[in-house]
Amino acid sequence: MAIHLAAFCIYGKQRWDYGEGKMEEFYLEDNEFIELNNLLKVMGLCESGGMAKILISEGRVNVDGNVELRKRCKIRKGQVVEFEGQKIIVK
């Protein structure tokens, strides 16, 4: 739980609409990576980390255009995460 609370303080985000879906920028700031399940939670796309893990294991999340099944996959700068019509660009 402390990791999630710290994530809200450390990371930055920006969102805007593009066409049919939404595109968001997620800033790692001074961090090297964020785990995929934490990214979905921090961005408000999942109500909990547990829900994020379930959605990832069901193959509903893409990273750089490919289905990602690893719940704790390390997402780094330059990667694009897609979930239910929303894109997150990690910077």
Image (cartoon, rainbow, N blue to C red):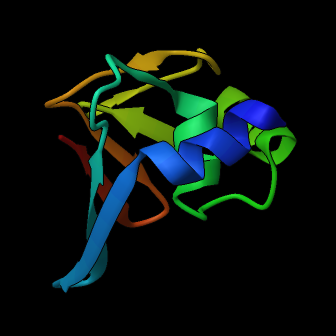
Q: Position of residue 53 (x, y in %)?
A: 75, 33
Camera-side residue of 90 and 21: 90
Q: Position of residue 57 (x, y in %)?
A: 71, 27
Q: Is residue 20 left or right of residue 55?
A: left
The structure residue drawn at horizontal position 28% and vertical position 22%, both measured from the top left corner, is 76
Examine the image and state in which quarter residue 66 appears. top left
Q: How many marks?
A: 0
The structure residue drawn at horizontal position 65% and vertical position 50%, both measured from the top left corner, is 41
Q: Position of residue 68 (x, y in %)?
A: 48, 23
The structure residue drawn at horizontal position 57% and vertical position 42%, both measured from the top left corner, is 7
Q: Is residue 77 left or right of residue 3?
A: left
Q: Quadrant of the C terminus?
A: top left
Residue 56, placed above or below residue 42: above
Examine the image and state in which quarter residue 55 appears. top right
Residue 40, placed above or below residue 71: below
Camera-side residue of 89 and 66: 89
Res 43 seen here: yes
Q: Position of residue 86 (x, y in %)?
A: 37, 64
Residue 24, placed above or below residue 60: below
Examine the image and state in which quarter residue 87 appears. bottom left
Res 59 seen here: no
The structure residue drawn at horizontal position 25% and vertical position 34%, both measured from the top left corner, is 65
Q: Is residue 63 left or right of residue 36?
A: left
